[in-house]
Image (cartoon, grey):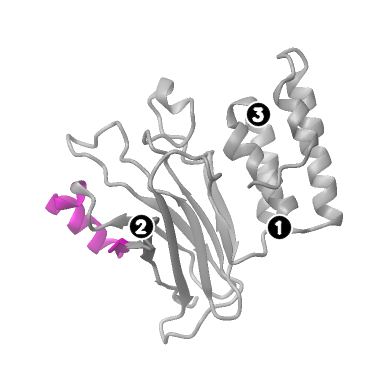
């Protein structure tokens, strides 16, 4: 995320008049460079437009960026946010395998979650709706030959809105697809989340085979959890 291109610096300070046009110019420039120079810094620069400048972009612009990021994704390691994102730092790693334990290469993981206020997008605080289809914090990963993956992020908060009087657990969405396998969609939750003391949520996670992670402090600087996922063949 730190490798933002110089052309973005001028865009941030532009007046509102014509700002959308200029943001589109920045998007087009980054997409053009990515198509000819598919490096990780270039990819992260485009990703950072949404995570760091979400409110400056239109819905269509964010959709355009997401489509490009999805088509250009090729790394098994990534991050959902910048280093300045508020919240406890966390790293999740794991392996994607079939039911026999064989690693699945080229599995595509779409990962997203709410921020430290429990919102997917800034407008959620006003609309009181969850923008799960247009989240600010997200990434797309593709597993290598070992089927492994890893991403860095911050620990999400629970939704401010309760469900039938219950606090919804902190969670991370992971949607996993791979050729020849059934799509796997999970909500990863955490064993030390107070909301998970509610038997309702324990039963919910167990019934839907959602991972309940045991988080550990690594090197005294952040949390780490392991999340292995099994996919079934078609």
Q: Secondary structure at mark 3?
A: loop
Q: Earlier in the sequence, mark 2 or mark 3?
A: 3
Q: Is residue 226 visible?
A: yes
Q: Which residues are magenta?
A: 195-216
Q: State which mark lies toward you, 3 or 1.
A: 1
From this view, report whether residue 147 is shown above or below residue 191: below
Q: Residues within 10 Å of mark 2 (few under 14, many from 20)?
A: some
Q: Residue at x 37, y 33 (%)?
A: 117
Q: Residue at x 71, y 42 (%)?
A: 4
Residue 218: % across, % down: 37, 63
Asked if the stretch drawn in magenta spans residue 230, the answer is no
Q: Residues within 10 Å of mark 1 (few under 14, many from 20)?
A: some
Residue 58: % across, % down: 65, 27
Q: Secondary structure at mark 1?
A: helix
**Residue 216 tag number:** none
Q: Earlier in the sequence, mark 3 or mark 1?
A: 1
Q: How many marks?
A: 3
Asked if the stretch drawn in magenta spans residue 201, the answer is yes
**Residue 40 tag number:** 1
């Amino acid at each position: 995320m730190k490798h933002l291109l110089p052309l973005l610096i001028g865009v941030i300070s532009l007046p509102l008049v014509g700002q959308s046009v200029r943001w589109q110019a920045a998007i087009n420039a980054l997409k053009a460079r990515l198509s000819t120079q598919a490096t990780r810094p270039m990819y992260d620069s485009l990703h950072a437009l949404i995570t760091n400048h979400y409110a400056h972009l239109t819905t269509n612009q964010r959709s355009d960026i997401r489509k490009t990021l999805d088509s250009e994704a090729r790394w098994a390691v990534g991050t959902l946010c910048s280093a300045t994102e508020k919240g406890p730092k966390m790293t999740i790693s794991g392996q994607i395998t079939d039911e026999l334990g064989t690693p699945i290469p080229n599995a595509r993981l779409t990962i997203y979650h709410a921020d430290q206020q429990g919102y997917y997008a800034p407008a959620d605080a006003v609309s009181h709706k969850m923008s799960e289809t247009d989240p600010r914090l997200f990434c797309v990963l593709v597993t290598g030959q070992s089927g492994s993956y890893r991403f860095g992020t911050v620990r999400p908060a629970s939704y401010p809105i309760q469900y039938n009087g219950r606090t919804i657990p902190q969670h991370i969405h992971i949607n996993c697809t791979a050729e020849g396998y059934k799509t796997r969609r999970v909500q990863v939750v955490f064993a030390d989340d107070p909301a998970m003391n509610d038997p309702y949520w324990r039963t919910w996670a167990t019934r839907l085979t959602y991972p309940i992670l045991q988080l550990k402090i690594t090197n005294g600087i952040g949390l780490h959890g392991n999340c292995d996922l099994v996919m079934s063949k078609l």
